[in-house]
C-alpha cells in the first residue's frame, strides 16, 4: 500500500492511497473537508463527499503525469515502470506542477 499527501496551494487537502493497482482511495483531510472556504482539489473530486474510491487511478491525478516520449524518458531516468502511475506521480508531481496541486509521499514507519 502506498500513500501520497495531496496539497492544494501548499495546504494539505487529503490523502491518495493505492491499496493495489485496482483499488485507489482519495480522502479529504478532516480540516480541509470541514472548512467551507477551502475548495475541492478538482471538479471531479468535489467536497460533496469526504472519500472517493476507484478501481483505477483517478483521472485528475493521471493527468498530472507526462505522456508519450516524455513519460518514457522519465520512466527510464527514474527506473519506474511506465504503468506505475502512483510511482510516477510520487516522483514527478512534488513541486513544479501545472496548477495548484502537488503531492508528497508518505513514508511508512
Image (cartoon, helix red, strand yellow):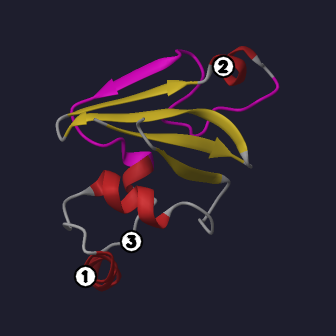
Question: Would residue 72 be counted in the magenta stretch?
Answer: no
Q: Earlier in the sequence, mark 2 or mark 3?
A: 2
Tell me if label 2 and label 3 are in contact, CB under 8 Å: no
Going by the image, does 94 lie left or right of 21? right
Residue that extends furthest to the front in the rendered view of this protein:
109
For the residues labelled 2 and 1, the Cα–Cα distance comes to 38 Å
Location of mark 3 (residue): 66
Q: Which mark is residue 33?
A: 2
| Element assignment for label 2 | helix
Quadrant position of residue 7: top right
Q: Number of marks in the image?
A: 3
Give whichever of 96, 2 is nearer the camera.
2
For the residues labelled 2 and 3, the Cα–Cα distance comes to 29 Å
Residue 94 x %, y %: 56, 60
Nearer the observer: mark 3 or 1; the answer is: 1
Q: Earlier in the sequence, mark 3 or mark 1?
A: 3
Looking at the image, which residue is at 64% across and 33% down?
13
What crowding class fits label 1: few (fewer than 14 Cα within 10 Å), some (14-19), or many (20 or more)?
Answer: few
Quadrant position of residue 17: top left
Residues drawn in magenta: 37-60
Going by the image, does 4 lie left or right of 28? left
Q: Which mark is residue 76?
A: 1
Looking at the image, which residue is at 43% across and 56% down?
90
Looking at the image, which residue is at 41% across and 37% down?
108
For the residues labelled 3 and 1, the Cα–Cα distance comes to 13 Å
Give whichever of 43, 102 is nearer the camera.
102
Q: Earlier in the sequence, mark 2 or mark 1?
A: 2
Residue 96 x %, y %: 62, 69
Nearer the observer: mark 2 or 1; the answer is: 1
Amino acid at each position: 500500500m502506498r500513500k501520497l499527501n495531496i496539497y492544494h496551494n501548499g495546504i494539505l487537502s487529503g490523502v491518495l492511497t493505492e491499496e493495489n493497482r485496482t483499488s485507489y482511495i482519495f480522502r479529504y483531510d478532516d480540516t480541509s473537508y470541514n472548512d467551507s472556504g477551502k475548495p475541492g482539489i478538482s471538479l471531479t473530486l468535489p467536497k460533496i463527499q469526504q472519500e472517493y474510491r476507484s478501481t483505477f487511478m483517478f483521472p485528475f491525478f493521471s493527468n498530472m503525469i507526462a505522456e508519450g516520449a516524455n513519460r518514457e524518458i522519465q520512466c527510464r531516468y527514474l527506473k519506474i515502470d511506465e504503468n506505475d502511475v502512483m510511482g510516477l506521480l510520487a516522483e514527478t508531481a512534488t513541486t513544479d506542477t501545472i496548477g495548484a496541486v502537488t503531492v508528497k509521499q508518505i513514508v511508512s514507519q
